[in-house]
Image: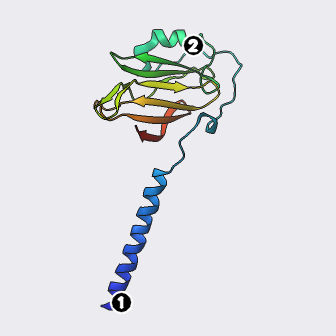
Amino acid sequence: MYFLSRIWAELRAVFYTILLVLGSSSLYAKTPTFQDYPAKKYTGKNYPLKLNPYSQKYRTLFKEMSKQKPNFAGHYVMETVGCGGGCSFALAYNAKTGHSFMLPDTFADCYSEQKGFTQNDIVYQKDSRLVMAVGSRFGNQEICETVYYQVDSDRFKQISKQLR
């Protein structure tokens, strides 16, 4: 019996140590920066636009985007679009392949009595694959986050988020 209780105590200690390490690593994780996700500049000709069932709804805007020079991640054209009062999302066109796609989330303005008003924003740079979006994603304007996405293979992948 002593042997089993000792093993159980050691297993609990290991479990709590792992929990502590995992919990603290997310608290102190480095905030992504645009410099952490560099992109090579594309100087070629824009490829003809390819729409999919999701991007078809915004075909007029995508057609205009396909005529522009890349302004995001080296070879993408990105546009922020309003979706009602205090709400926005982003569209992206790949100048190298013609593919069109969207940021997976919409972002609304945030407000709470403790923190006040925060306007939604979607920030990106010409020479970086990182997108930083600020706002409320799920309809509760009191929950405001900064969400970081990396563009890869014509998709936005969430890599980090922080509550504001």
Q: Is residue 53 visible?
A: no
Percent x, y of residue 47 = 62, 17
- Image depth: mark 2 or mark 1 in front: 1
Label 2, residues with CA under 10 Å away: few <14, some 14-19, many ≥20: many
Query: What amino acid is found at the position of numbered circle 1 in the picture?
Result: Phe
The span from disc 2 to disc 1 (Cα, nearest Å) is 70 Å
Question: Would you identify the image quadrant in which residue 134 lies?
Answer: top left
Residue extending farthest to the right is: 43
Question: Would you identify the image quadrant in which residue 115 lies?
Answer: top left
Q: How is the image coloured?
A: rainbow
Label 2: element kind:
loop
At 35% from the left and 19% from the top, the residue drawn is 86
Q: Identify the residue under disc 1.
A: 3
Q: Is residue 72 visible?
A: yes
N-term mark: 2 or 1:
1
Q: Identify the residue under disc 2.
A: 66
At 60% from the left and 12% from the top, the residue drawn is 68
At 59% from the left and 25% from the top, the residue drawn is 125
In the image, residue 118 above or below residue 12: above
- Left or right: 67 with respect to 111? right
Label 1: element kind:
helix
- Left or right: 43 with respect to 68? right
Percent x, y of residue 11 = 39, 76
- Left or right: 141 with respect to 101? left
Residues at marks 2 and 1 touching, judged by CB atoms closer than 8 Å: no
Label 1, residues with CA under 10 Å away: few <14, some 14-19, many ≥20: few
